[in-house]
Image (cartoon, grey):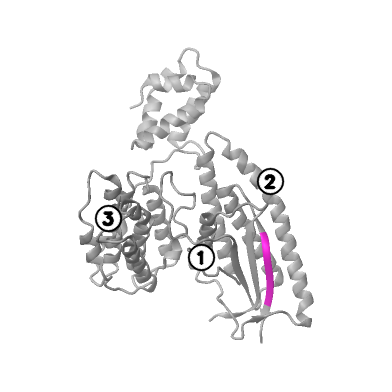
Amino acid sequence: MLSLETVRTAALAAQPWSRLDELVRAELSAGRKVREIAAEFAGMLDDVWDTPGLSEDGHDAFGDTLDKLTGNCRSADCYTDPPTLPTHEEVAGLPRWARVAFAARCARRVLPLYAVGRPDAGRVTAGQVRHAVELAEESAARADARSIPGEDYIRSGSLAYSADDPADEAAHNASQAAAYAAADAADNEQPERAFYGMNYADDAARRTADISPHVRRDFDYLTRLAGWQRWADEDPVPPDVFGPLWPEGLPAGWPADPDLPAYAELPFVMTVRDGASDRTAEDEAANLFNALNAYYIARTGDRLTLDGYKALVAAL
Amino acid sequence: MADDAKLRLDLRLVPADDRPPDPAVLDDLVRLIRQGVATSPPQAPRVSDPAAGFRGPDDDQARPLRDLDSKVKHRIEQAEADAKAAVAKRAEVAAQPDGPQRLADQALTAAGRVVSAVQRAALRGVAVRVPDPPDPTG
């Protein structure tokens, strides 16, 4: 609950918009819903506006904050409830191989936590856990049910973990996420495996970062894609459909991927269909360059430049 | 049924101003291009490499190809000039109290633009792909 005193203090601050925003976001991070916070703000409206010494800015900031809580603003500016993990019903509702791909994606996201928590490997190596994820991804990409060798080995081999060691516990949960992703690709289809795997991945990440917004974003994107492309249970779903795991950058404290390719440049090829004009080729090359550069700038603050260019024609 | 490609453009981008490359972000760009390819609309024309492959232009093809090359490079040069302003703007955003969140939001939006650019190219008969990654051991 927010007290009147707390809200008044924020409204009286030198930067009332920022202070009130921090209050709201702290409440949302604590698990409260937008409508609950909106009701509290609405209930103290008269008291806040009657605060002795309240400036015009403080008056407006409170009103603007209430507008953002009640949806009386541009949609991009309104407060929304924090994303939650998909439910069991939601995950089970995905087409077969989309579900396996989703489970594999969740497991891949937390893979680096296994090596961090168990650097000495023991019975199950980081390579074995990664291999289980890769096989699940391949299975979904080919729409090919298979028994993943060692899946039970991974699941049983990592059951023991130290509850006093958060990194070891995270490693255990990461391995279980991989095992369930692999299990979901097996012949005896059981939709709940993907749901369990997703939750193990969330548990693995819990002490390092909240990955539920990323998992939710993956799920919602996959659901839209499945509808747009009309996927049925027999349609393959390659891991490439998801794109980068962390397009905004790694969360604070998250371990880097030890298997990252050593890119020093970005080569790419554009092939132009017979019948497409040279103007089309020119437009698409420029448009793609702009988009690539915009992302690189957004992430690094540096820009890209064209270092190599070659044009070839079809040999007849 | 796929159509044969008539033309192939090989491009290579590197960080400007001798800045060190960021392998993680370059890897993300590769993944975004692949995401655009994997999620291209089903109605996008399929473009296949010709059976005989590609070669340098002969005398008849050289001039029109030089014209295209010149136009593509000129468009990219213009875009690079605009990018300098984007770099300065990003630095301003980074300095704000809410800079990290705004930059994260901008990165997410920019990621979507890469995917859309690849999909748009596919719809217009221009297929984009990336070569296989380098060996992580260097």
Front residue (pair A279, A213): A213
Q: Which residue is mark 2?
A: B85
- Say which amino acid is labelled 1: Arg
How far across and how far down the image is residue A200, in percent? 28, 53
The label shown at residue B34 is 1
Residue A63 shows in this picture: no
- Say which amino acid is labelled 2: Ala
Q: Nearer the viewer, mark 2 or mark 3?
A: 2
User: Is residue A255 part of the magenta span, yes or no?
Assistant: no
* Mark 1 belongs to chain: B
Q: Which residue is mark 3?
A: A88
- Neighbor class of circle 3 (other Cα within 10 Å; few <14, some 14-19, many 20+) is some
How far across and how far down the image is residue A123, in percent? 24, 61
Residue beneath the point at 31% across and 58% down: A91
- Neighbor class of circle 2 (other Cα within 10 Å; few <14, some 14-19, many 20+) is few
* Mark 3 belongs to chain: A
Front residue (pair B2, A164): A164
* Mark 2 belongs to chain: B
Mark 2 → mark 3, Cα distance in angstroms: 47 Å
